[in-house]
Amino acid sequence: MAVGVENPVSIASQQATIEKLQRVESDLREGQEFAQAMFDASQAGMVVVNTDLHQIMEANTISGQILGLDKDDLVGAMINDFIPPANEGVRQAFLATGLVRDQEIELIHSDGHKVPIILSVTRIGGPASNMALLSFIDITTRKEAELELLRSREELKRANEELKTHKDLIVQSEKLASIGQLAAGVAHEINNPVGFVTSNLGTIQEYVTTMGSILKLYDELEQTDPSASDQREALQEKIRAVKEEEDLEFILDDLGNVLEESMDGVKRVTEIVQNLKSFARQDSQERRPLDINEGIESMIKMVWNELKYTCEVERDFGEVPLVQCHPGQINQVVMNMLVNASHAMGSEGGTITVGTRATGNEVEIRISDTGSGIPEEIRNRIFDPFFTTKDVGKGTGLGLSISHGIIQDHGGRIEVDSEVGKGTTFRIYLPLGADKQEGLIG
């Protein structure tokens, strides 16, 4: 082999190594370019921070947009300048550990306002590295949406409260309208006992006058000189004559009856007035235990003048627990059903049967009539507001609608069975649930 001549195999090997290194270099360059492109193209803000110097070493376009700066202006800036004191703990955490996961914090925009973000931090190059990648997403739009949702909820809450207030006013207005429609009957129910109490008071006044006359004669007799026998005998005779003429024995017997009858009349008026006051007043916000049977009985008494001339009322009360409810509202439903049953039977009259029973976790109130029934074609409309089959001026068309709403508000339901020409039965179910009372009411 000639001196100075290279080995062809060695040259080829060196050439292959050079080409391999060039390919690696090219691959690395392409990888870096790809990584840089991905870094710049990311929809999340990204900055690389030297955790020892607290300095931003690299930044992508989105990070600049989020902070209100060009990305080149971010490079060399101190990360501390963009993190408000309120988020100091997070800053210390990622500088110390280089690790944060989906932390919601704020950054300071170049104009001074705060930008809400979701931040994640990853250390670059292993645990000993002082380089960390901060990735963050601007959630300003989400925060604004949350605030708008919160405002909407508050507005909805206010609207619901206003709706409830209006609904309560409508219920109360219908209640007062019902009293207005029943006013003549209620007045008649009061006038009857007031009339005989007034008459009895006149009788009592006559009795008192008679007994006063007799007592006056006895007083004269007591003051007469015992030796004036003729005068005393004349007074005694006069007393006997007055007692016989006025029938004192009858007066004494009748007085007790008249007083008892008058007391009953006053008691009846008191009951009517109390029922009216209880029915008319606005229910409190808190529910109270109600004896359903007692409530129904008070409503029968209240509308009795509406019923007594054309209807017989039969009671079939069972033993039922006390029900937690708004008593005035439940009584309003019962009263409405009783009046409707009376109207359904018209002048021919009939029988209204009112019953109660406990069924599992519910109390059932059953009101049946033997009236004309409800045609099938309008049965599904009877609870619609302002729907009525009554003549103008005899109904508001709100009674059943409001009754349906009241029972729904109590978590209950109303069911209707009706057959034309045979009558209608309304079944009202009120839940007991956690409010079920231990004692039963017969």
Image (cartoon, grey):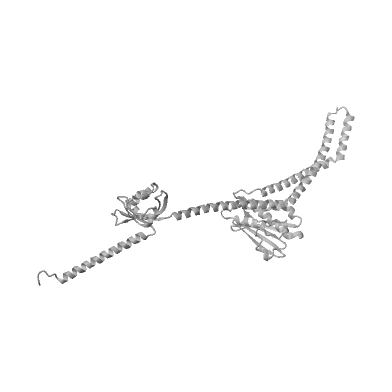
Q: Is residue 442 visible?
A: no
Q: Nearer the viewer, residue 241 or 97?
A: 97
Q: Nearer the viewer, residue 122 or 49?
A: 49
**Residue 335 in picture, x, y percent from top left:** 68, 54
The image shows a total of numbered marks equal to 0
**Residue 217 in picture, x, y percent from top left:** 85, 33
Please indicate whether residue 11 sits to the left or right of residue 154 in the image. left
**Residue 285 in picture, x, y percent from top left:** 60, 49
Quadrant housing residue 345: bottom right
**Residue 423 in picture, x, y percent from top left:** 71, 63
- The quadrant of the rendering that contains the N terminus is bottom left
Q: Is residue 16 above or below residue 233?
A: below
Q: Is residue 22 visible?
A: yes
Q: Nearer the viewer, residue 126 or 204?
A: 126
Tell me the residue at 74%/54% (across/down): 306
Tell me the residue at 45%/55% (across/down): 141
Q: Is residue 199 above or below residue 365?
A: above
Tell me the residue at 66%/63% (across/down): 379
Tell me the residue at 83%/41% (across/down): 249
Please indicate whether residue 169 sits to the left or right of residue 64 in the image. right
Of all residues, the one furthest to the bottom in this rendering is 1
